[in-house]
Amino acid sequence: MTVLSEDLIAEANAREIAALDEDYDALGRKLARGGLAIDAIKDRVAAFSVAVPSWGAGRGGTRFAKFPIPGEPTNIHEKLEDCAVIQQLSRVTPRVSPHFPWDKVGDYKGLRQEAAALGLGFDAVNSNTFQDQPGQARTYATGSLSSTVAATRAQAVEHNIECIEIGQQLGSRDLTVWVGDGTNFPGQQDFARSLDRYLDAASQVYAALPGDWRMLLEHKMFEPAFYSTVISDWGSSILAAQELGPKAKCLVDLGHHAPNVNIEQIVARLHRFGKLGGFHFNDSKYGDDDLDSGSINPHQLFLVFNELVEAEAHPRDGFDPSYMIDQSHNVTDPIESMLSSAEAITSCFAKALLVDREALHAAQEANDTMMAFQALRRPYTIDVAPILARARAEAGGAIDVLATYRASRWRERKAQERKPVGLGAGIV
Ligand code: LRH
Ligand code: MN
Ligand code: MN
């Protein structure tokens, strides 16, 4: 079952294919001069994928306002439909990362079938102990896995174990744990004891992981806590992961660091110790902005992928990072943002594949700074769009994803069918 008409995509592609062939051939000749076979790069790109977040399918908001759009999804079923549109056009987002209890349903086996019928699978399950939910026995006002209240910690452990059980039914094999636990005042809590409590509770979750599962620890510098956060940085994250055991890995959300932190170096460090578990891709200018991937600092995204391709060439223990988008789409149609972001992420991967690693390593060894820098700069300036478009078209996706999406009038059609989100969804 396809969500968009295959004819619509085929007709749009027919209008674009001659220009694409020309661009692809020209790029192929350019790359061949440097000893690279464009088809081999295209095959690597075709095998690449990044998961989309279920929560990214709806319009996001800030703590001040949310401006819904007509036709946006309001439940996991509608969200899956929109994710299927992204996958059908881009062919690079075959999995959805769900969040609980936001995506709670009665029948998870049924949900898995529903997703499969739409051409989708499930990626990491995300637990949520950073908000209170209706009917919940204990508040997370004192924290969750690190709370001073034993019953609250037990509730947070139980929720994470429930997420694992749901994930098993959905076919996931990763549990992503981000806790907002922390403090707003100096002295509010003891740094050492709060980490002890976190480790003790997290180890109970760890003990419930099935054999082939991983626990991805996501750190974040601040927010909602503004003075200290229990798992605030990659140091705390890797220490916790090392203490928990081999199935615990670190997840790097690009927006969760201090401004100007060298994230690509963090990636290399985590890999060096076999603890690189995954990514939440997004972009930011000030903090955890959750802006679209590559919209602010595409060069950083490229440098991150450069480390990933380097890591792949020099694998350490269990190198198998999972890639996910984690963005908040406040002012765009979320489908358009994720199409554009998936393209930005994939193009950074493709550019990283073009790096002449021999030349890079030789320049590094010879302390030839300029040539080492040029080994990275040259591929960064190459427009790899034809490679991505060809890979998409060969897989049945759209050459021009955004134009084809607009031509489908998906959102306008859904605005007629779906119930409005609430205030604002129809105001012009
Ligand atoms: C926290 C975070 C984490 C959550 C998501 C909604 O800022 O990045 O990944 O699960 O946002
Ligand atoms: Mn995140
Ligand atoms: Mn975040």
Image: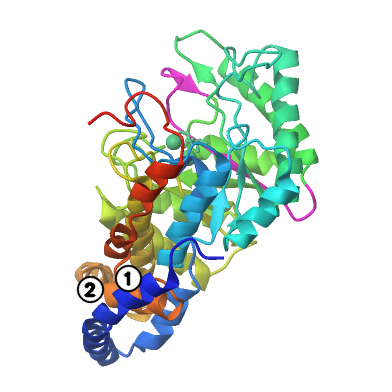
Q: CA–CA distance between discs 2 and 1?
A: 7 Å
Q: Is residue 225 left or right of residue 217?
A: left
Residue 382 is marked as 2
* Residue 358 placement (x, y as % from top left): 37, 80
Judge whether 45 appears above or below 106 on screen.
below
Judge whether 143 appears above or below 266 on screen.
above
Mark 1 vs ligand 2: CB under 8 Å?
Answer: no
Q: Are marks 2 and 1 in contact (CB under 8 Å)?
A: yes
Residue 378: image quadrant is bottom left
Residue at numbered disc 1: 351
Circle 2: residue type: Ile
* Residue 191 placement (x, y as % from top left): 56, 19
Judge whether 366 appears above or below 259 on screen.
below
Circle 1: residue type: Lys
Residue 322 forms part of the magenta stretch: no
The residue lying at 30 percent from left, 40 percent from top is 284
Front residue (pair 84, 357): 84
Residue 283: image quadrant is top left
Front residue (pair 91, 416): 416
Pointer 2 or 1: first along the chain: 1
* Residue 280 placement (x, y as % from top left): 46, 47
Residues in magenta? 210-229
How busy is the neighbourhood of tag 1: few (under 14 within 10 Å), some, or many (20 plus)?
A: many
Q: Quadrant of the C terminus?
A: top left
Residue 252 is marked as none
Residue 216 forms part of the magenta stretch: yes
The residue lying at 62 percent from left, 35 percent from top is 100
